[in-house]
Amino acid sequence: MKFGFIKVAAASPLVQVADCFYNIQQIEGLMRKASEQEVELIVFPEMSVTGYTCMDLFTQEALLQSAEKALLQLVEKTSDLPLLSIVGMPLYTENQLYNTAVAFQKGKILGVVPKTYLSNYKEFQEERWFASSKKLRNETVRIGDHSYPIQSHLLFSDGEASIGIEICEDLWVPVPPSSILAMQGANLLLNLSASNEAISKNRYLRSMIKQQSARCIAGYIYASSGFGESSTDLVFVGKGFIAENGVLLQESERFTMKEKLIVSEIDLVNLRHDRQVTNSFMQGLTDFSYPKPTIIPFERNETATRLTRVIDPHPFIPSGDALQERCEEILQIQVTGLTKRLLHTHAKTAVIGISGGLDSTLALLVTALAIDATGLSRNRIIGVTMPGFGTTDRTYQNAIQLIRSLGVTLREISITKACIQHFTDIGHDINRHDVTYENSQARERTQILMDLANQENGLVIGTGDLSELALGWATYNGDHMSMYGINSSIPKTLVKYLVEWAARHRFDPASRETLLDIVNTPISPELLPADSNGNICQITEDLVGPYELHDFFLYHFLRFGSTPSKIYFLAQQAFGDKYTKDTIRKWIATFLRRFFSQQFKRSCLPDGPKVGSVSLSPRGDWRMPSDAAVTLWLKELETIED
């Protein structure tokens, strides 16, 4: 299966100005290299057949005839290649010369797209030689012995991929042709360019391409003229970019005297999903009168696409410097949301259950920063440690030390006696360590927190995270409930990075050592007794599966609506040999069963701040019937063939 991926390439061949037959040799060579890599679509620079810097040579009949003959020769010589190719060249029709992109495949020219917006300022003087597509009256152009469609609004489509083309300056205007083409159905946007190099221009161009791909919710493939163009007044370095919905997948190296070929895959299914859920995407198309696009069919490879793009195993966690920026931004969002809620409710205190685990630690840190923002003393925070049957000395000591080092008011209330009395009241054997045994402890702790909040005129700050909500790994009306769920949009895999970042950048050394030890503590609800050595014996990931897998499943399931088979495929790409295929399949099934069966818990969640693109708030991002069947998804998972 292709899973919606199309392999694309941007190429910048070596050129010799006005030597058309040399240039098509270079183009053919790159086409064959791309075809060997199973590329399905390749785009070349503006005027790649002649060279962009021919200047007044564009008025020479010899050059124009040579370009036409070279194009026809290129089309014929590459008739054995299946990929759709787009090259740039000048074409004469209707008494005028046009700067065009020519699309061809398997020995046939499919159509021609002329440039609409000609650059005619500073170093550019295109209007000296070319006419805008707006001056075209006819819809066909003669090339050799045949006529072909020529329009600015051609779309090349195979039913899934729909390709729109613009040329260089078209992208730089306030409303680029690609914006209209995208609303008319194009999900792949190509730009044949001859943009020269100048200080900071590359950074600006990269940003513009990313923004346009995001604004159009599309793939954007950009190829620009490279080494060999005339250096009379300008320098060309062969820039190439491949972007998808705001994310740069590939960028060519600059300042090399070699040909360039960059390859990646665009996920058409994800683009379709985002257009579908962004219901404002089509608004504007009906506000103005635009020509109806002409659809030209092309063929695609039916074999599975082998990915070269990296599938991030931890999509919630950016890498490098971006992680530091992300951590600070998330904490600020959480702090701002909680500060507003504390001020709005006139709460005198904030009550938090502190277990010594990651989630409650993050909630406490956010609350400390929010209290600081209000100008109140941190002793208005009541950190409650509630040791029970499974509490270990490590988590207990960490909880106590953290509360004290942050200047928070400490309350220690053991739940042991209350739970024993409760077991007696309902006739439950204390030695029977079942779901009743575990959940009664969670509910006892929540009751204590709620009553303390009433007593102290405060808010109970929830500690449960996004991953727990997805899996339903929370006791209904226990830790599932609070007065403000501060971590409700934070996935488990991100929590430890937030705590570690806060430890190193926002809190004093006295708290740092404790925080870093908490980061390294195994994840556990600690509802079952410790082992004989006092160590945690109830490891969450042994029961529900690795959180890094579940967060990966959750991201692709919610963010893109991906099918189980695609999630399975992507997980294999992302995690390599870390997990076997059977292990991945097993935990996908667990994720799906738990996600569907536990929706009733998410349907009545307390308020909490959204921080990222994935959220499970029943009032916002995710509204699902609590009794929806998982059958369809599990059946597809069962039918996957390796």
Image (cartoon, rainbow, N blue to C red):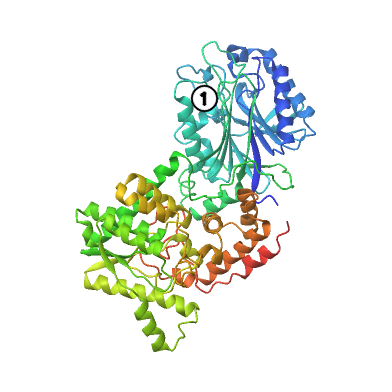
Q: Residues within 10 Å of mark 1 (few under 14, many from 20)?
A: many
Q: Which residue is mark 1?
A: 118
Instruction: Compare residues 397 and 203 and report the one nearer the observer.
Output: 397
Q: Position of residue 613 (x, y in %)?
A: 46, 53
Provide residue 462's location: percent of width, then percent of height. 35, 64
* Left or right of residue 98: residue 519: left
Relative side of 208 to 413, left or right: right
Q: Is residue 248 above or below residue 201?
A: below
Residue 390: percent from left, percent from top: 43, 71
Residue 367 lies left or right of residue 525; in this view the side is left
Quarter residue 9 falls in: top right
Residue lying furthest front: 533
Secondary structure beneath dot 1 equals loop
- The answer to whether residue 289 is seen in the rendering is no
Q: Using the image as rendered, state which of residue 23 and residue 158 is in the foreground.
A: 23
Indicate the position of residue 518 as horizontal and vertical percent values.
Answer: 40, 56
Q: Amino acid at mark 1?
A: Leu
Q: Residue at coordinates 37% horizontally, 53% vertically from top-left?
A: 515
- Give the vertical position of 83 relative to 423 (above or below): above
Q: Which residue shows up at 50% across the image and 67% down it?
A: 537
Q: Quadrant of residue 485?
A: bottom left
Q: Tell me the residue at 53%/66% (across/down).
A: 595
Instruction: Give the answer, above or below, for where 288 lies relative to 424.
Output: above
